[in-house]
Image: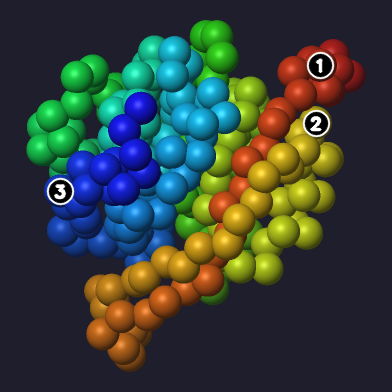
Amino acid sequence: MSTKTRLAQQLGVVAGFEDPRVDLEQYRTPPDIAAHLIHTADLQGDVEGRTVVDLGTGTGMLALGAVLRGPKRVVGVDLDLDPLATARANERRVAAAADVEWVRADATALPLVPDGPTTVVMNPPFGAQSGNEHADRGFLATAAAVGDVSYSIHNAGSEAFVESFAADNGGRVTHAYAAELDLPHQFDFHEDDSRTVDVEVFRIVWDDDARDADADAE
């Protein structure tokens, strides 16, 4: 296993969005945050030999971090076709030993059900734009439906929401840590050259028995 620092260096070549969409809150996940998330997942045994699904993969940062840590399969899902083209180019830049499957689809209505142990990783939209509040809820619902465990990045102050959502959907938060997300000036309404946003990263274990019981009840 390479170090977290080495993983961040490898991910440093991953290009961001050429024409980011404000409605999808498209920002490049910083390599250091992606490396920390993936390294933590790997230490927990949640990457090697497993299927890893990156919801809202964008230009592929988390998916490419995962593919560098010996998974069985990696799938990157995004609704926007242009970032997926960049993700494919990024895959060549990091020179991963295995391929990533890039899928154009709505992460909140996933058209696939992975077989075997599955880890979901994601940096979902925070719902910062008017009319898009709680946009991360749909991503968590997908994680609960397809994953045994998930790692997700949320706006600071989301702990109560994430814990409540997990509890209501057969899951429990096992790990949480704070981080800082540096956002560049990339939209017209941005007033500063860059802005630092406090975020929280959560690991959730999803209970198969609870999900099966919910399905039977329906």
- Under mark 3, the amino acid is Val
- The answer to whether the residues at label 2 and label 1 have Cβ atoms under 8 Å apart is yes
214 sits left or right of 3 in the view: right
Q: Quadrant of residue 154?
A: bottom right
Point out which mark residue 96 bears. Answer: none
**Mark 1 or mark 3, which is nearer the start of the sequence?**
3
Occupied quadrant, residue 130: bottom right
Horizontal arrangement in the rendering, residue 126 relative to residue 33 (left or right): right
Distance from label 2 to label 1 (Cα)? 8 Å
Disc 3, SS: loop
Which residue is more in the foreground, 12 or 206? 12
Instruction: Name the amino acid, label 2.
Output: Gly
Q: Are marks 2 and 3 in contact (CB under 8 Å)?
A: no
Chosen colour scheme = rainbow
Q: Mark 2 — residue?
A: 170
Residue on which disc 1 sits: 209
Question: Residue most toward the right?
Answer: 217
Residue at the spot x=44%, y=13% of the render?
49
Residue 118: in sight, yes or no? yes
| Residue 207: quadrant of the picture | top right
Please state the horizontal and vertical placement of residue 203, each as a whole percent of the image: 63, 41
- Give the residue pinned by disc 3: 13
Instruction: Name the image quarter holding the N terminus.
Output: top left
Q: Position of residue 79 (x, y in %)?
A: 36, 41
